[in-house]
Image (spheres, rainbow, N blue to C red):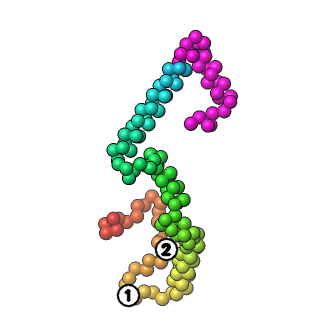
Amino acid sequence: MFNDIGPLELVTLVVLAVLVFGPDKLPKMIQDVTRTIRKIREFSESAKEDIRSELGPEFKDFEFEDLNPKTFIRKQMENDDLGLKEIRNGFDLKKEMAEITDAVHSRESESSSSSTPSSSGSVDMTKKPEKTDPDERPPFDADAT
């Protein structure tokens, strides 16, 4: 819990505690704090046991840490019943994105090289939009929203 507190910070906390509470009251304060922490832990363990007993025997191995999404996912990735590692290793996102961008760029180059206008009246989606004034709002399309 306090793994990131260094020795200098710990000494500073002790000196500050002695200055705030005084050397006479400090031992009693430490006892009160440890007693309170112990009671909170006992209450927490009691609540966990009550919940486990209410859930029934099929949840006897239930761990409350599994409710943390990161812990749950890490545990499921270790337990590879679904073949998730095979799926993850078989899918290369960088390769897929490179193929898509190559396909898009090849379409753009084909459309720019063919200069025949479209006689069917359809809209050419590969044509880049004209530059507009930065202060001008784009046209509103009610069907698109």
Q: Is residue 45 left or right of residue 113?
A: left
Q: Is residue 59 left or right of residue 20?
A: left
Residue appearing at x 50%, y 20% in the figure:
32
Q: Quadrant of the N terminus?
A: top right
Circle 1 sits on which residue?
A: 120
Amino acid carrying label 1: it is: Ser
Residue 3 position in % (x across, y down)? 61, 37
Stretch in magenta: 1-29
Is 44 rendered above or below residue 66?
A: above
Magenta segment, principal secondary structure?
A: helix
Circle 2 sits on which residue?
A: 128
Residue 65 position in % (x across, y down)? 47, 46
Q: Is residue 22 magenta?
A: yes
Is 42 rendered above or below residue 28?
A: below
Q: Residues within 10 Å of mark 2 (few under 14, many from 20)?
A: few
Residue appearing at x 31%, y 66% in the figure:
142
Dot 1: what SS?
Answer: loop
- Looking at this view, is 15 or 77 the one in front? 77
Q: Residue furthest right?
A: 8
Q: Quadrant of the C terminus?
A: bottom left
Residue appearing at x 68%, y 28% in the figure:
8
Give the quarter of the image for residue 11: top right
